[in-house]
Amino acid sequence: MPNGWFMVDSNSSYNQTKKNESVANMPSHKNTLMIIKSKNIKVQDFLNGIMLSDPEKYNALIEMRKIAFDIHPNQDEIMMYGGIIFSINSEHFSGLFVRKNHISFEFSNGFKMKDPNKKLEGKGKFRRHLKIKNYEDIKNKDVVFFVKQAINSSQ
């Protein structure tokens, strides 16, 4: 298991796993999430606040962060404009913003992205976004497909 990964049970107790333990060998718990604790204290404080105020959005937020870090583990994240901004080599390529009724996954150069099923929203000059209204939307709106494109275009 990558360094920085934690198991969080439904009681929100943190148990850092062994450095070389694989996810496949982890015990399966109904209410267990695998998360990456942020190196950035402001990001971690933000995540902790969402965990307390809206567990459903927190679960989706954590899953989307996991997707981003699975694709490119060495990216950076900071708090900016009220959300989490992801960057590689100081180039911002996407961000997660928690709204009242959804989470917006923003893509800085979304206008360049392939979008065969018209899932991206926005009509600005550059930016496009996905509105994630529930955990199932992560798969339904093909978040992995868009995050891969955003990361590949920023390298």
Image (spheres, grey):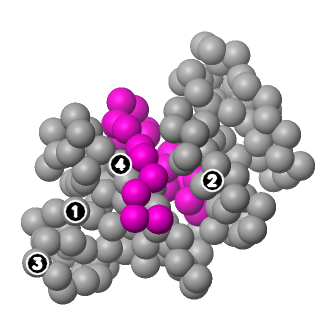
* Amino acid type shown at disc 4: Phe
> How many other residues sit within 10 Å of disc 3, few (<14), some (14-19) or many (≥20)?
few
Structural distance between the alpha carbons of marks 4 and 3: 20 Å
Residue holding disc 2: 47
For residue 125, the mark is 3
Give residue 37's position: percent from left, percent from top: 61, 37
> Which sits earlier in the primary sequence, circle 1 or circle 3?
1
Q: Nearer the viewer, residue 100 or 65?
A: 100
Q: Identify the residue at image location x=56%, y=21%.
A: 3
The secondary structure type at the circle numbered 4 is: strand
> How many other residues sit within 10 Å of disc 4, few (<14), some (14-19) or many (≥20)?
many
Give residue 125's position: percent from left, percent from top: 11, 78
Q: Which residues are magenta?
A: 59-82
> Which sits earlier in the primary sequence, circle 2 or circle 3?
2
Structural distance between the alpha carbons of marks 2 and 3: 30 Å
Q: Nearer the viewer, residue 71 or 51?
A: 51
Give residue 74's position: percent from left, percent from top: 36, 30
> Which sits earlier in the primary sequence, circle 4 or circle 3?
4
| Left or right of 139 on screen, residue 89 | left
Residue holding disc 1: 108
> Which sits earlier in the primary sequence, circle 4 or circle 1?
4
Q: Identify the residue at image location x=41%, y=44%.
A: 77
The secondary structure type at the circle numbered 2 is: helix
Structural distance between the alpha carbons of marks 4 and 1: 10 Å
Query: CB atoms at circles 2 and 3 under 8 Å apart?
Result: no
Structural distance between the alpha carbons of marks 1 and 3: 10 Å
The secondary structure type at the circle numbered 3 is: loop
Q: Is residue 123 visible?
A: yes
